[in-house]
Image: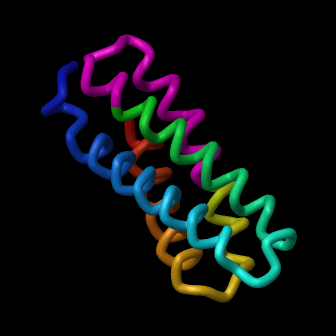
Amino acid sequence: MNYHDHKACIDACLQCAALCNHCASSCLQEDDVDMMTRCIQLDMECAAICEAAARLMSLGSSKGSEICRICADICRQCAVECEQHDNQHCAECARACRACAEKCLAM
């Protein structure tokens, strides 16, 4: 497998990482940051695993499908958390996480 075989998943992972980073940063600007700590933590974890998954798929790693399963799990957890908050950045993040999880599970 190579980059072109995984392009849709790589793109979904990179978009998810960017939106998770944006969400974490935006959550830090909320009035009640303490209420957002779980969201921020999951955003950071999700961004990290999405970036790693995209990198390994780009390299044609034999571990691509394994990391994608982990990535999908963390993306789902992040989406569930973000869906509990009523703001635009969490809604965008949740959608990106769900889309990424779907692509990763299709690997």
How many numbered circles are shown? Answer: 0
Q: 97 or 107: which is nearer to us?
A: 97
Res. 99 image quadrant: bottom left
Q: 21 or 53: which is nearer to us?
A: 21
Q: 19 or 29: which is nearer to us?
A: 29
User: Where is residue 54 shown, x and y percent of the image?
Assistant: 35, 34
Res. 106 image quadrant: top left
- In this rendering, the answer to whether 96 lies above or below 101 is below
User: Where is residue 18 shown, x and y percent of the image?
Assistant: 41, 56
The region drawn magenta spans 55-75
Q: Residue at x 45, y 30 (%)?
A: 52
Q: Residue at x 20, y 40 (%)?
A: 7
58 displayed left or right of 47 = left
Q: 107 or 72: which is nearer to us?
A: 72
- In this rendering, the answer to whether 11 lies above or below 96 is above
Magenta stretch, main secondary structure, is helix
Q: Residue at x 67, y 68 (%)?
A: 28
Residue ranking furthest to the top? 62
Q: Residue at x 62, y 64 (%)?
A: 79
31 displayed left or right of 1 = right
User: Where is residue 32 shown, x and y percent of the image?
Assistant: 82, 80
Res. 30 image quadrant: bottom right
User: Where is residue 12 shown, x and y percent of the image?
Assistant: 34, 52
Residue 70 painted magenta: yes
- In this rendering, the answer to whether 25 lies above or below 52 is below
